[in-house]
Image: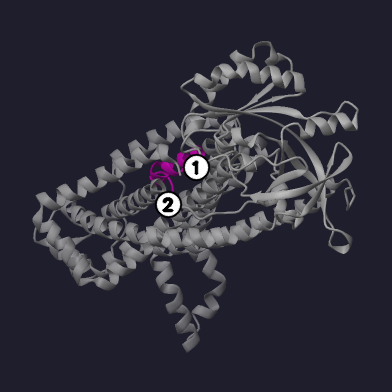
């Protein structure tokens, strides 16, 4: 999936890996230090890799689901079209003959490797008798010259599926779909109601539903084939105005999928050849191109939906990785302090972490590919049961598991970049240690005051995002409506902290972001009309982060009702004090853990709500589709 994003992802992957490689080559001491940490602390390394695997696995699983659906829908190009790229349909016999004559000039065209003219219509069919009698109200009936059909299309098109002799008078050839529906085989009788009159035909043979043998009208691919003239004669005998349509199938040069690339050019040539017939009811349908486009859209749609649901788990995985690295830094505090004490600069400490993180990211991304394929396979198995419960007319689809190298490369690159950037940014934070406090393993004395240049930069960015938010909100742009105001408020906090108590500032900012996230769709009802799932990911993440941040900044208020229990001079009170002391003291780590759990719960609730919405519309849709009737004859 998403081959257009592969160059960018691979480019960023190469840049990040090159940065780590240059550091490792130019700084042997840092390389040895980082690799020694990986080798010595195997338990910690396993923990970091396990946390990094989550994001890669979900991304790869999402792409695999999209590949599978894309591939499964594309199978219709083989089973229902084969060498057919364009279909020219004429409403009358006379006009169909004229169209076929005009299209003959395309036989020598280098972009066209075959033409096949057939006549077709729909009819009902029945087989058996008594309690074993079966009926099918919609069957595609075709009269075809099998000799011409056998050579229709060029090599690599998969064949027409209609090789063999043309059925004799009173005989028919069925494709596998119709034979299975009617429960009959070669030598048995099938009654076909051609233009209202029953006509018995002996089944000459059954062919696979493939290529021309699987061509259908809409979702109906149950086909019966007859000798040329059968349908025309039946229409004359029945009288009236009904008559079969004439179709000319056009095969483009190239394989089943590659030929569709020429459809636009070939369509122009077909219309030029048809001349005035195109304005008199003769239609040109780029059937193959439309089917492949629908397949790609369907695959991308389901894959993006799965990625949308998994995005919250990916964010939780990133926070898990941040938490793990912060915990590792706490355990290595004395070691980090000693390194700084003997002269290692903070920048070199960050580079050492980058080398170490690159090793973790590479291993985790490779493992994540394997796990992601397994996740995708599990989702496909569940989805296949759902799709198989519907008939073809109801949107049923036989899923065939498929993985493309593009998706694996994209998943690997994305997973690596997420892990690499998370480690790099986290290492910048944990490298800021007080040397004496770190060596003696003392708690930090307090947070440092934000430097003036960072305050100025964040204030300027806040103003820019504030300005960008105005047109985004005015135009109901989903991503900008939620993201820009939230970023503006967040970047304004360093300035406000210098003017007001930090707790007030962060509490007000959390309430502002939370309130805007809950009220924006009420003020701008069209904010979700852009159809992208990114808006929902941003909204959900924004709500969870702001709510947890609000709780983290007001832990004293939350724990105040429990003070009588906490301050009791009893073993229970001691246990309560110990339980509360660490989360309150480590606000960053506590907040990250709360966000992780909150995102998981948020995802579960989101899936439940979506399922409830779908279930709530089923009865209404059934009533609208059936008009209140249970049986249609």
On whether residue 355 falls in the magenta region, the answer is: no
Label drawn at residue 486:
1
Residue 577 location in percent, x, y? 45, 78
First of labels 2, 1 by sequence position? 1
Circle 2 sits in a helix, a strand or a loop, which is it? helix
* Residue named by callout 2: 502
Residue at image position (47%, 56%) is: 61
Circle 1 sits in a helix, a strand or a loop, which is it? helix
What span is in magenta? 482-501
> In this rendering, which labeled residue sits more in front, label 2 or label 1?
1
Whole-number angstrom distance, CA of label 2 to CA of label 1? 18 Å
Q: Main secondary structure of the magenta part?
A: helix
Residue 526 picture location, percent across and down: 65, 35
Front residue of 474/48: it is 48
Residue that sits furthest to the top in the current view:
276
Which residue is at a point 69% across and 26% down the rendered structure image? 89
Rendered residue at 62%/47% (across/down): 209
Taking the spot 49% from the left edge, 20% from the top edge, the residue there is 109
Pick the residue in front: 179 or 533: 179
494 magenta-colored: yes
Instruction: Decide if residue 533 is in sight here.
Output: no
Horizontal side, residue 44 vs residue 157: left or right: left
Location of residue 406 in the rendering, given as x and y in whole percent from the top left corner: 39, 45
- Residue 9 numbered tag: none
Q: Position of residue 210 (x, y in %)?
A: 59, 45
């Amino acid at each position: 999936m998403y081959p257009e994003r592969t160059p960018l992802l691979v480019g960023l992957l190469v840049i990040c890996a090159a940065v780590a490689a240059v550091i490792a080559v130019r700084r042997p001491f840092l390389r040895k230090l980082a690799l020694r940490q990986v080798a010595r602390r195997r338990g910690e390394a396993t923990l970091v890799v396990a946390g990094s695997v989550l994001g890669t696995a979900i991304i790869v699983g999402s792409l695999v689901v999209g590949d599978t659906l894309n591939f499964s829908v594309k199978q219709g190009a083989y089973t229902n079209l084969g060498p057919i790229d364009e279909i020219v349909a004429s409403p009358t016999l006379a006009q169909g003959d004229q169209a076929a004559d005009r299209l003959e000039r395309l036989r020598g065209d280098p972009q066209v490797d075959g033409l096949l003219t057939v006549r077709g219509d729909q009819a009902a069919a029945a087989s058996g008798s008594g309690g074993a009698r079966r009926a099918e109200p919609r069957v595609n009936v075709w009269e075809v010259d099998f000799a011409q059909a056998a050579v229709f299309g060029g090599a690599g098109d998969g064949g027409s599926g209609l090789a063999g002799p043309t059925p004799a008078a009173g005989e028919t050839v069925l494709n596998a779909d119709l034979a299975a529906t009617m429960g009959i085989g070669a030598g048995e009788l099938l009654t076909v109601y051609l233009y209202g009159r029953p006509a018995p035909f002996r089944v000459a043979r059954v062919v696979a539903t493939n290529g021309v043998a699987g061509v259908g009208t809409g979702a109906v691919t149950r086909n019966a084939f007859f000798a040329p003239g059968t349908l025309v004669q039946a229409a004359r005998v029945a009288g009236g105005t009904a008559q079969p349509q004439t179709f000319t199938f056009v095969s483009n040069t190239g394989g089943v999928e590659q030929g569709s690339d020429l459809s636009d050019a070939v369509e122009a040539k077909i219309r030029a050849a048809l001349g005035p017939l195109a304005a008199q009811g003769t239609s040109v349908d780029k059937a193959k191109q439309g089917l492949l486009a629908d397949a790609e859209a369907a695959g991308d749609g389901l894959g993006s939906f799965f990625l949308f649901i998994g995005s919250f788990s990916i964010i939780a995985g990133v926070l898990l990785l941040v938490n793990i690295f912060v915990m590792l830094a706490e355990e290595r505090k004395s070691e980090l302090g000693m390194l700084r004490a003997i002269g290692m600069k903070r920048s070199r400490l960050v580079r050492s972490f980058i080398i170490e993180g690159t090793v973790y990211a590479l291993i985790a991304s490779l493992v994540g590919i394997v796990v992601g394929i397994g996740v995708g396979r599990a989702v496909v198995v569940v989805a296949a049961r759902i799709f198989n419960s519907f008939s073809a007319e109801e949107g049923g689809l036989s899923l065939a598991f498929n993985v493309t190298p593009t998706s694996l490369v994209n998943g690997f690159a994305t997973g690596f970049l997420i892990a690499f950037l998370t480690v790099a940014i986290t290492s910048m934070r944990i490298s800021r240690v007080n040397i004496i406090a770190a060596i003696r393993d003392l708690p930090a004395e307090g947070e440092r005051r934000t430097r003036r240049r960072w305050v100025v930069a964040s204030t300027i960015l806040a103003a820019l995002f504030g300005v960008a938010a105005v047109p985004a909100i005015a135009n109901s742009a989903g991503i900008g409506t939620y993201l820009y105001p939230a970023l503006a408020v967040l970047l304004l906090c360093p300035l406000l902290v210098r003017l007001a108590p930090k707790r007030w500032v962060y509490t007000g900012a959390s309430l502002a972001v939370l309130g805007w996230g809950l009220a924006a769709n009420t003020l701008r009802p069209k904010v979700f009309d852009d159809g992208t799932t990114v808006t929902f990911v941003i909204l959900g993440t924004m709500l969870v982060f702001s709510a947890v941040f609000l709780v983290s900044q007001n832990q004293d208020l939350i724990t105040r009702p429990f003070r009588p229990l906490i301050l009791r001079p009893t073993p229970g009170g001691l246990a309560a004090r110990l339980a509360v002391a660490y989360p309150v003291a480590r606000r960053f780590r506590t907040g990250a853990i709360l966000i992780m759990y909150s995102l998981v719960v948020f995802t579960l609730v989101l899936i439940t709500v979506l399922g409830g919405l779908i279930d709530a519309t089923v009865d209404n849709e059934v009533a609208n589709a059936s008009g209140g009737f249970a049986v249609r004859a």
